[in-house]
Image (cartoon, rainbow, N blue to C red):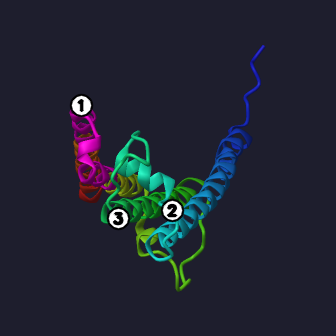
Amino acid sequence: MPVPAISARPLSNLIFLSRWLQAPLYFGLIVAQGVYVYRFLLELWHLIGFSVLGHPVPVSAVTAAVGSAPIAAAPVVMETVVMLSVLGLIDVVMIANLLIMVIVGGYETFVSRLNLKDHPDQPEWLSHVNAGILKVKLAMALIGISSIHLLKTFINAEQTSEKALLWQVVIHVTFVASAIALAWIDRLTYRKEDAH
């Protein structure tokens, strides 16, 4: 007795529709973006209070500047604290940019078109985004975030062990090497496609 053939069309449609399971993940990242906006505003308020209004030093900046030493006993240089606070703000902004790239680029690439062709605020990079370009852009964003963390460590090198400093440099160089490899693979892939 012959086995009845399963229609490929409904199965194909079901598999294609499964891409919508990713939509809640992107909405979750939008919520995470809101958390970063809140964190940015809180850190900015602490920085303004410390720099302009003379309020106590932001706890995160003191921790970054003096490590685990008691705050009363640690000499905190205002310029270092302000610089570390500003770098913390830049770090939050870069992570938020990374989130936007993942949300917008990932949704456009893997779930559904956003239909922003004539929108005046459409990001320039979105018009030619694909999975390869998105990976390279994300790798570049990670390098930027890693650079900020490394700069914060260098500014406060006396509070960091040599081993920790070495590992941060190794991790940063690994990010750079990974980004170069991704860009090279992406270039080779699309060069081969253009040749056909």
Residue 138 x, y percent position in the rendering: 39, 54
Q: Residue at x 43, y 72 (%)?
A: 51
Q: Is residue 158 magenta?
A: yes
Residue nearer the viewer, 194 or 165: 165
Amino acid identity at mark 2: Pro
Q: Which mark is residue 12?
A: none
Q: Residues within 10 Å of mark 1 (few under 14, many from 20)?
A: few
Q: Secondary structure at mark 3?
A: helix
Residue nearer the viewer, 105 or 63: 63
Q: Mostly what secondary structure, the magenta segment?
A: helix
Q: Which mark is residue 163?
A: 1
Q: Nearer the viewer, mark 2 or mark 1?
A: 2
Q: Earlier in the sequence, mark 3 or mark 2?
A: 2
Task: Identify residue for label 3.
Answer: 78
- What is the C-alpha distance between the residues marked 2 and 1? 32 Å
Q: Secondary structure at mark 2?
A: loop
Amino acid identity at mark 1: Lys
Number of numbered discs: 3
Residue 186 x, y percent position in the rendering: 29, 51
Tell me whether the residue at label 2 lies in contact with that at label 1, contact meaning CB atoms closer than 8 angstroms. Answer: no
Amino acid identity at mark 3: Met
- What is the C-alpha distance between the residues marked 3 and 1? 27 Å
Residue nearer the viewer, 119 or 101: 101
**Quadrant location of the N terminus?**
top right
Task: Identify residue for label 2.
Answer: 56
Q: Secondary structure at mark 1?
A: helix
What's drawn in magenta, residue-wise?
146-170
**Quadrant location of the C terminus?**
bottom left
Q: Earlier in the sequence, mark 2 or mark 1?
A: 2
Residue nearer the viewer, 57 or 189: 57
Answer with the quarter of the image where residue 108 lies. Answer: bottom right
Q: Earlier in the sequence, mark 3 or mark 1?
A: 3
